[in-house]
Amino acid sequence: MGCGPDNPHGHHLQVRRDGQDVVAEHVFDERHVGAPGIAHGGAVATVIDDLFGFLLYGMGSLGVTRSLQMDYRAPVLLGRNYILRARLVERDGRKMHTAATVAHETNFVATARAVFVAVDLGHFTEALSSADRDRSSR
Ligand SMILES: CCCCCCCCCCCCCC(=O)SCCNC(=O)CCNC(=O)[C@H](O)C(C)(C)COP(=O)(O)OP(=O)(O)OC[C@H]1O[C@@H](n2cnc3c(N)ncnc32)[C@H](O)[C@@H]1OP(=O)(O)O
């Protein structure tokens, strides 16, 4: 949904490092519409969540979102280029506190904070096996 190239409904996010931060440019389009002309808040949260995923992956940590808090300060408009930026605020054991901004030029239209919890590879492989079992029992 966030970055994979094969999902036609995905955001195809392309992320780069900038010092300790990760940064992406993103344009929301009609697939992400909420109110006319405005990106759905869930779509904005999706790209921020994914950006955090990149941040942690780049640090060599596998982590999943435990909580995500969005602050929508102004409408995120379709067809407009936004700069998304994320950083690690603090690491406390398995918990990674992260923060992000969504900006157009010098205007911050949304900010976010999240708690990610470090997991091992088993978290993903077990979920895959459970999904496979559910599919084959249908
Ligand atoms: C095949 C491999 C592929 C890999 C691909 C990677 C791609 C990634 C793509 C990314 C895509 C984008 C990203 C996505 O979409 S990630 C997908 C959406 N997220 C999930 O599916 C996560 C679902 N949740 C869980 O699996 C479990 O709850 C986890 C694993 C997160 C924790 O369950 P677990 O039982 O293990 O741990 P715990 O409950 O003891 O908690 C642990 C610690 O956290 C503290 N805590 C809890 N809540 C909060 C809170 N709100 N504020 C502050 N702290 C909080 C808690 O007190 C404790 O602290 P401490 O007592 O230890 O000090």
Image (cartoon, rainbow, N blue to C red):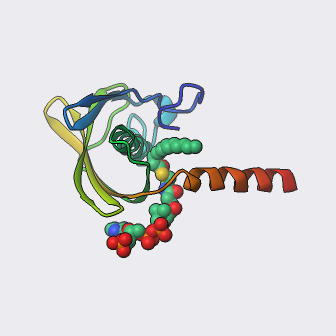
Question: Height in image: 31 above or below 115?
Answer: above
Residue occupying the point 64% across, 55% down: 126
In-front residue for pair 61/39: 61
Left or right of 135 in this view: 6: left
> For residue 54, what is the image quadrant?
top left
Q: Position of residue 121 (x, y in %)?
A: 54, 50
Residue occupying the point 56% across, 56% down: 123
Can you see residue 138?
no
Q: Position of residue 69 (x, y in %)?
A: 33, 58
Residue occupying the point 47% across, 56% down: 119
Left or right of 103 in this view: 56: right
Check the image and name the residue furthest to the left: 106
Ligand 1 is located in which of the four quadrants? bottom left
In-front residue for pair 59/88: 59
Q: Position of residue 52 (x, y in %)?
A: 35, 45
Residue occupying the point 21% across, 38% down: 20
Q: Count up the numbered dots.
A: 0
Can you see residue 46?
yes
> For residue 107, what is the image quadrant?
top left
Q: Quadrant of the C terminus?
A: bottom right
Q: Position of residue 111 (x, y in %)?
A: 25, 48
In-front residue for pair 88/32: 88
